[in-house]
Image: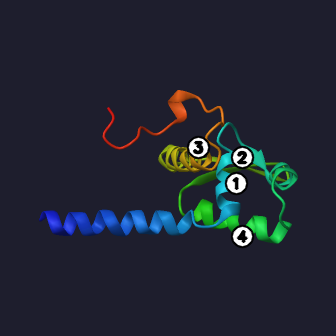
């Protein structure tokens, strides 16, 4: 496979991922489940939205492979399936927070390195 075809596939894949992450509620859901699974009720207590809207976004994230789910009785618990997505969200959100609030105390390991610094 030539380099141009590979590069095109990479850009298409990244564009699909960015499209999936282009909704603030989805970013909030990913953030909420980063450190452990949660059911819909727990997510609704943290994220201001309606139950139908939450279910729609959870379904989209599940179908895309970002989240996995398990049933326990009548409850469905969602957990992060893609650490790659979590790392990307964490990096971008941390960088934006640093730019919006330069005095924010953010752990060094969470910061992105400025261009040219290694």
The residue where tag 2 is placed is: 32
Q: Which residue is mark 4?
A: 56
* Mark 2: secondary structure: helix
Residue 94 falls in image quadrant: top right
- Between discs 1 and 4, the one toward the N terminus: 1
Q: Dot 1: what SS?
A: helix
Q: Is residue 35 left or right of residue 53?
A: left
Nearer to the camera, 6 or 106: 106
Residue 101 x %, y %: 65, 44
Q: Secondary structure at mark 4?
A: helix
Q: Earlier in the sequence, mark 1 or mark 3?
A: 1
Residue at the extreme front: 103
* CB contact under 8 Å: marks 4 and 2: no
Q: Quadrant of the N terminus?
A: bottom left
Q: Are marks 2 and 1 in contact (CB under 8 Å)?
A: yes
Report which residue position mark 3 lands on: 98
- Please identify, in this view, whether the residue under mark 3 or under mark 4 is nearer the observer: 3
Residue 41 image offset from top left, x and y in percent: 86, 53
Q: CA distance from mark 2 to mark 3?
A: 20 Å
Mark linked to residue 28: 1
Dot 3 falls on a residue whose secondary structure is helix
Q: CA distance from mark 4 to mark 2?
A: 16 Å
Distance of mark 3 from mark 4, alpha carbons? Answer: 31 Å
Q: Spatial distance from mark 1 to mark 4, Cα to Cα? A: 14 Å
């Amino acid at each position: 496979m030539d380099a141009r075809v590979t590069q095109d596939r990479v850009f298409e894949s990244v564009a699909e991922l960015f499209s999936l992450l282009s909704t603030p509620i989805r970013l909030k859901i990913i953030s909420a489940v980063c450190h452990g699974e949660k059911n819909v009720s727990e997510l609704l207590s943290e994220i201001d939205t309606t139950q139908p809207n939450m279910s729609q976004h959870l379904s989209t994230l599940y179908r895309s492979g970002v989240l996995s789910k398990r049933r326990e009785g009548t409850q469905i618990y969602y957990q992060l399936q893609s650490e790659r997505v979590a790392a990307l969200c964490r990096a971008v959100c941390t960088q934006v927070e640093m730019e919006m609030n330069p005095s924010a105390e953010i752990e060094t390991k969470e910061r992105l390195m400025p261009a040219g610094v290694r």
